[in-house]
Image (cartoon, grey):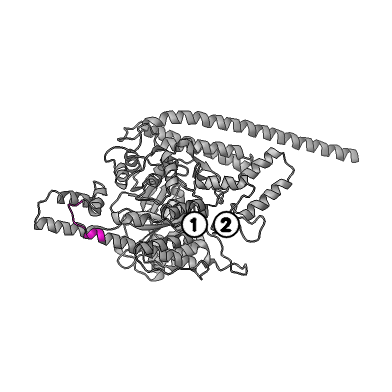
């Protein structure tokens, strides 16, 4: 069950865009997520807000022992203290005034019992009854959850001053987890980008991830997954260690912001349908394993928790309340996540003015799936950002690559014993020298070089927009990167928080035009685009060919499901009519791409057979000649 009033959350957005979102909106009851990747950024933001709210601040140096964990804990404690300060101020404000207290209640969904009670209050005449209800409503006001996010694969090994690796306990993911676990927050941690078994095992050291005697869990677990299979595998792994998943957060593989972890052609509606049909299996599989662990540890498993089932939520490309209703009523989703549209809400996110204006003006052609990420995963990007201009200029001047000041994304050991980053000057210099020495046509060399020098210092650039916004850094010294989902192309203004929340709940005028394609239609198009890219880089190995065939099959299955959905009665504002023409066009395109691929594959196979036959004949001739 959820522990807050709203029916949506604001997911993590980069390292900096949602870094202070809880400070901005938690006091208004809205839940949001902070990235724990960049502890050095968190330290700068902590200093800024400590000064702003007159809180004590003591710097935690970059080289301090266990410094990363300490910086994360210190930042989260600061955020929580500020949220409490702001919440207390709002609670003390009077009703029947145009203030933050009235805003808190105005933002609530109409179905909320608290909102209904507030509406009742507005119609009661002054007196003891109204006074009692005012006290009751005030007592029930609670902040949104201050949640955090860990990309579990961003988990570099840390080395000491002598170049020796420190113990596994000091890896980035574990120190990030420890920083959260040692904070006093009562919230949730979102694990994204796959499974990290060592990290999940490490969680067992912290009692806050388990139920207390009353059945409450202080620190809840949220898993970001792509499908039912992933939810089941990860959930069982945790359950065997007594750890419960509070929420499975299903995200579109491509129609999202940030890094895009594409599925093998499994569209969001296909994944949601399976989860809905097998949802009961999750709790049935997990509970016996969890209770077995509690028994082994000699702990009591509260009776009140026996029938507690994990929440299932969805995010990625949602554009209006009609689509929200489709996700809830057809697929049984409990809540939805809204990320990219909030990038255009300055009350909510921390973005510099020039990048904000780029976002406002962006169209579909300005938003693209790029290869700029050093971790080798497609990255949703915006053209003409400070980061893109800076990176291209350095490459054009013959000085590509970053100094790599933070080293969070180091992974490559092609030239060095210790891993280095693909966006670093060190790596790019050595790789470009290697390419120059190869005997290749110049055009091909340039193609390889372009792929190398486009890698961007995301560690630094994704946080710079927040630093510029808060006046901590100057724009000219801080290239800004941002990672919106393609859905933001249909939002073209700077919005107030109330405008965006009203849009989510279907109150008042829609913020997007009626002709915007349905989120399911957009995802289909993106997956066919992705399939085309995979075909182009395919080496026609048996494994690759099998994967592409499965991709096509899954994609066709998803398209057919979308077609059946399009025949239903649309909810208000839901553009179901955009699905059939999209499916027709993309099916034709998919067949054409695959047909060309088959011709190429067959030709290569014929050539391979010819060469093998020729080699065999020549070998026989040599043997005969020698005899």
Span of residues in magenta: 89-97
Q: Earlier in the sequence, mark 2 or mark 1?
A: 1
Q: Position of residue 440 (x, y in %)?
A: 72, 41
Label 1 secondary element: loop
Visible residue check, residue 627: no
Q: Give above or below for 550 relative to 302.
A: above
Q: Position of residue 281 (x, y in %)?
A: 39, 51
Q: CA distance from mark 2 to mark 1?
A: 21 Å
**Would you say residue 314 sits in the magenta stretch?**
no
Q: Is residue 573 left or right of residue 350?
A: left
Visible residue check, residue 611: yes
Q: Which image quadrant is residue 582 in?
A: top left
Contact between marks 2 and 1 (CB within 8 A): the answer is: no
Q: Which residue is mark 1?
A: 152
**Would you say residue 90 sits in the magenta stretch?**
yes
Q: Residues within 10 Å of mark 2 (few under 14, many from 20)?
A: many
Q: Nearer the viewer, mark 2 or mark 1?
A: 2
Q: Give above or below for 191 relative to 584.
A: below
Q: Which image quadrant is residue 609 in?
A: top right
Q: Which residue is mark 2?
A: 404
Q: Is residue 282 left or right of residue 89?
A: right
Q: Position of residue 561 (x, y in %)?
A: 41, 35
Q: Give above or below for 611 relative to 349.
A: above
Q: Nearer the viewer, residue 562 or 21?
A: 21
Question: Quarter of the image containing the C terminus?
Answer: top right
Q: Nearer the viewer, residue 362 or 281?
A: 362
Label 2 secondary element: loop
Q: Residues within 10 Å of mark 1 (few under 14, many from 20)?
A: many
Q: Position of residue 272 (x, y in %)?
A: 40, 44
Question: Quarter of the image containing the N terminus?
Answer: bottom left
User: What residue do we see at 17% from left, 52% from top?
Assistant: 96
User: What residue do we see at 63% from left, 41% from top?
Assistant: 542
């Amino acid at each position: 069950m959820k522990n807050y009033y709203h029916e949506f959350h604001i997911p993590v957005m980069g390292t900096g865009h949602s870094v202070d979102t809880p400070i901005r909106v938690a006091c208004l009851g809205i839940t949001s997520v902070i990235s724990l990747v960049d502890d050095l950024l968190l330290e700068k933001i902590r200093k800024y807000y400590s000064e702003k709210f007159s809180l004590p601040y003591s710097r935690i140096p970059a080289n301090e022992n266990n410094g990363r964990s300490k910086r994360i804990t210190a930042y989260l404690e600061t955020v929580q203290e500020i949220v409490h300060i702001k919440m207390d101020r709002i609670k003390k404000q009077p009703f029947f005034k145009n203030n933050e207290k009235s805003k808190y209640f105005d933002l609530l969904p109409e179905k909320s019992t608290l909102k209904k009670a507030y509406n009742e209050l507005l119609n009661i005449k002054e007196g003891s009854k109204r006074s009692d209800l005012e006290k009751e409503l005030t007592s029930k006001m609670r902040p949104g959850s201050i949640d955090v996010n860990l990309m579990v694969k961003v988990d570099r090994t840390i080395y000491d001053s002598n170049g020796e690796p420190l113990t596994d306990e000091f890896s980035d993911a574990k120190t990030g987890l420890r920083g959260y676990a040692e904070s006093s927050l009562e919230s949730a941690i979102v694990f994204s980008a796959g499974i990290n078994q060592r990290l999940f095992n490490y969680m067992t050291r912290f009692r806050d991830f388990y139920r207390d005697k009353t059945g409450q869990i202080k620190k809840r677990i949220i898993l970001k997954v792509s499908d039912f299979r992933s939810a089941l595998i990860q959930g069982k792994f945790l359950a065997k260690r007594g750890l419960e998943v509070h929420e499975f957060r299903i995200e579109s593989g491509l129609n999202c912001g940030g890094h895009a972890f594409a599925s093998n052609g499994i569209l969001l509606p296909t994944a949601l349908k399976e989860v809905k049909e097998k949802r009961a299996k999750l709790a049935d599989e997990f509970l016996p394993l969890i209770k077995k662990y509690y028994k082994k540890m000699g702990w009591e498993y509260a009776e009140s928790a026996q029938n507690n089932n994990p929440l299932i939520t969805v995010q990625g490309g949602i554009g209006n309340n009609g689509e929200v209703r489709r996700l809830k009523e057809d697929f049984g989703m409990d809540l939805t996540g809204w990320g990219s549209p909030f990038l255009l809400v300055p009350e909510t996110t921390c973005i510099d003015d020039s990048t904000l204006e780029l976002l406002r003006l962006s169209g579909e052609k300005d938003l693209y799936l790029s290869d700029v990420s050093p971790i080798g995963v497609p990255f949703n990007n915006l053209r003409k950002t400070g980061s893109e201009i800076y990176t291209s200029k350095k490459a054009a001047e013959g000085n590509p690559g970053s100094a790599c000041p933070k080293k969070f994304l180091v992974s490559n050991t092609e030239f060095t014993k210790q891993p280095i980053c693909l966006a670093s000057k060190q790596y790019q210099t050595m790789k470009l020298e290697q390419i120059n020495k190869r005997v290749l046509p110049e055009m091909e060399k340039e193609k390889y070089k372009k792929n190398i020098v486009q890698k961007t210092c995301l560690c630094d650039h994704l946080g710079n927009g927040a630093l510029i916004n808060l006046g901590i850094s100057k724009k000219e010294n801080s290239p800004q990167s941002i990672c919106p989902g393609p859905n933001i192309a249909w939002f073209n203004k700077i919005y107030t928080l109330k405008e965006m929340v009203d849009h989510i709940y279907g109150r008042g005028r829609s913020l997007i035009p009626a002709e915007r394609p349905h989120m399911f239609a957009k995802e289909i198009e993106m997956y066919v685009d992705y399939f085309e890219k995979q075909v182009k880089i395919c080496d026609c190995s048996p494994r690759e060919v099998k994967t592409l065939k499965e991709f096509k099959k899954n994609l066709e299955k998803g398209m057919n499901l979308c077609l059946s959905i399009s025949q239903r009665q649309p909810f208000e504002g839901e553009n179901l009519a955009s699905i059939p023409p999209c499916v027709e066009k993309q099916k034709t395109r998919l067949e054409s791409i695959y047909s060309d691929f088959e011709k190429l594959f067959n030709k290569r196979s014929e050539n391979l057979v010819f060469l093998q036959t020729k080699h065999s004949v020549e070998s026989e001739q040599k043997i005969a000649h020698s005899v």
